[in-house]
Amino acid sequence: MDALVVDHAAPGLLRLAPVPDPSPAPHEALVRVAAASVNPGEVRALGGAPAGSVHGWEASGTVVAPAADGSGPAAGSPVVTVGAGGGWAELRAVPTSLLGAVPAGLPVDHAALATLPVAGGSALRALRDSGPLLGRRVLVTGATGGVGRYAVQLAALGGAEVVATARDAAAADELRRLGATAVLNDPSELDGPVDAVVDTVGGPVLVEAFAALGSDGTLVSVGRASGRDAVLPADALLGDRSRHGRTIRTFFLLDGRPGLDRDLGRLAALLGRGELRAAVDHVVTFADAPAALAAPRPGKLVLLAHGPDGPSLAR
Ligand SMILES: NC(=O)c1ccc[n+]([C@@H]2O[C@H](COP(=O)([O-])OP(=O)(O)OC[C@H]3O[C@@H](n4cnc5c(N)ncnc54)[C@H](OP(=O)(O)O)[C@@H]3O)[C@@H](O)[C@H]2O)c1
């Protein structure tokens, strides 16, 4: 098969190259990849990845060989997958615990599905870690990002009043369409406390968001997109004035908690039913991925394993 392998001397640190087909373990399904989406963390990880390794955390595709242990969906099932690598390839062997099946009868849009596992999965689980949603006020920072967009939609679907923050005021209308009731530039503009925070920005935004958290509220720190240090002022941890019992919780999607397969399937169902919207800003084939990663553009990049003419990829 062909795969995007790490090459530290190549543009975008990637090269499309022939590699041996993966050999699935008994608990792994073999999936023919249709599309993969690109996350900021995996682009950062490219620099430290071993040369020759197959990169890529998430991919959508179709099961070609079900897991030998009987777990997971049957051959022919459309699926979304996640893992620490191996997604940017024509074939991926993936544990069935890290694979969600698209429910039968729903439309299958592989480019949209490919954006779900990391961003949607993280949004879903971070919201769950933040506590109940129904009737509560939830702040999502970095709401224009991959995780943020899904967090806004899922929090609204869960019955929360969603406040979103975005640096770009032009994003406000779109975020309102996704379910935000208010869109602010940063958390310091909040007019009152929130019950929970999903923070993807870190740095001063995390500090301001924590200051806005009411009693017994939880801030889930999903990411640090700002790349800045979060420095809490001396009195930030005081539990006075209805701010007692607050928690900052760290997060890792692949923490081994059970049920990620079900969560990914549920997200795929929401997407297929049109209750969740994916953002796909740029689409290129695997062959064009090194150039696309060498000259990154804002927005969500999706890589298609095959161009419109089928599986023969120019190298
Ligand atoms: N822990 C985990 O398991 C896990 C899982 C998934 C993601 N993550 C991490 O979560 C973070 C978000 O991921 P993502 O895929 O959503 O990234 P993304 O699509 O790049 O979105 C980043 C968001 O942060 C905003 N932002 C960046 N710098 C900012 C700053 N200085 N001030 C205010 N806002 C700023 C961006 O706003 P603009 O649109 O204005 O640029 C955008 O809304 C990343 O750090 C990622 O590595 C962690």
Image: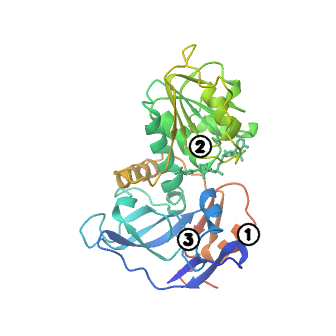
N-terminal of the two: label 1 or label 3?
3
Separation (CA) of disc 1 from disc 3 = 15 Å
Residue 97 lies, in percent from the top left, at 35, 59
User: Where residue 160 sits: x, y (%)?
Assistant: 49, 29
Residue assigned mark 3:
55
| Residue at x-position 68% and y-position 40% | 203
Asked if ligand 1 lies within 8 A of label 2, the reply is: yes
How dense is the environment of label 2, judged by Cα within 10 Å: few (below 14), some, or many (20 and up)? many
Give the secondary structure at mark 2.
helix
Report the front residue among 196 and 2. Answer: 196
Above or below, 58 relative to 88: above
Residue bearing the label numbered 1:
294
Question: Sequence order check: which comes first, mark 3 or mark 2?
Answer: 3
Residue 275 at least partly seen:
no
Residue at the extreme front: 234
Provide the secondary structure element on which disc 3 rests. loop
Residue 102 is tagged as none
Residue beneath label 2, please? 148
Q: Quadrant of residue 176?
A: top right
Amino acid on which the number 2 mark rests in the picture: Gly
Tell me: residue 173, above or below residue 25.
above
- Is 109 in front, or is 207? 207
Closer to the chain start, of discs 1 and 2, is: 2
Q: Is residue 221 left or right of residue 106?
A: right
